[in-house]
Every structure is written in C-alpha cells, then in structure tokens.
Image (cartoon, rainbow, N blue to C red):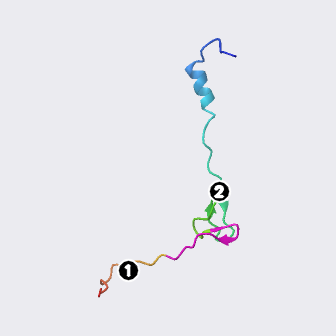
C-alpha cells in the first residue's frame, strides 16, 4: 500500500482545498412563466414541469388595506 513519506504541510493542504468551492446554481428559464428555476424541478412560481401542471397554485387573496375594519358576523 502506498504511504506518503513526509507529512503534507498546512499550506500545501490549504492550497489544494482552495479549489474545492461551490459554484453558483445553474438556473433555467421556465417555458411557461419565464421565471428562473432549477433544472429538472417543478417551477415554484407556476407549478409546472415538463409541460404539465404538477402543483396547483391559487392566487393569494389580497389582504384588506388599512381602511375600515370589515364587520364579522
């Protein structure tokens, strides 16, 4: 079995590890809504994948603005 003759210094070890960095995520454009999404995943905006709707997204209800409070019965 191959065994190193000398211990590798901290500097040499750190120089090697400097190349092991995370790259930026690749983002593709959704063909339906044109928002950015990760490849091979459902679009978080419109919920489609491979041309079909996988997750049903409903439009969020608008919260009442700071006017008069609505009467609750």
Of residues 73 and 9, the one nearer the viewer is 73
Q: Residue at the spot x=45%, y=78% of the render?
A: 61
Q: Is the magenta region chiefly helix, strand or loop?
A: loop
As drawn, the label of residue 32 is none
Of residues 30 and 66, the one nearer the viewer is 30
As drawn, the label of residue 27 is 2
Q: Residue at the spot x=60%, y=30% of the render?
A: 17
For label 1, the residue is 64
List x then y, in percent, for residue 33.
Answer: 64, 71
Q: Quadrant of the N terminus?
A: top right
Q: Residue at the spot x=62%, y=61% of the render?
A: 37
Alpha carbon separation for disc pair 2 and 1: 35 Å
Q: Quadrant of the C terminus?
A: bottom left
The residues colored magenta run: 48-59
User: Element under label 1?
Assistant: loop
List x then y, in percent, for residue 44.
Answer: 57, 65
């Amino acid at each position: 079995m191959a065994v190193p003759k000398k211990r590798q210094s901290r500097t040499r070890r750190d120089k090697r590890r400097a190349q092991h960095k995370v790259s930026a995520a690749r983002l593709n454009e959704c063909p339906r809504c044109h928002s950015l999404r990760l490849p091979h995943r459902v679009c978080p905006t419109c919920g489609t994948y491979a041309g079909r709707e996988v997750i049903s997204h409903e439009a969020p209800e608008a919260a009442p603005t700071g006017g008069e409070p609505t009467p609750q019965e």
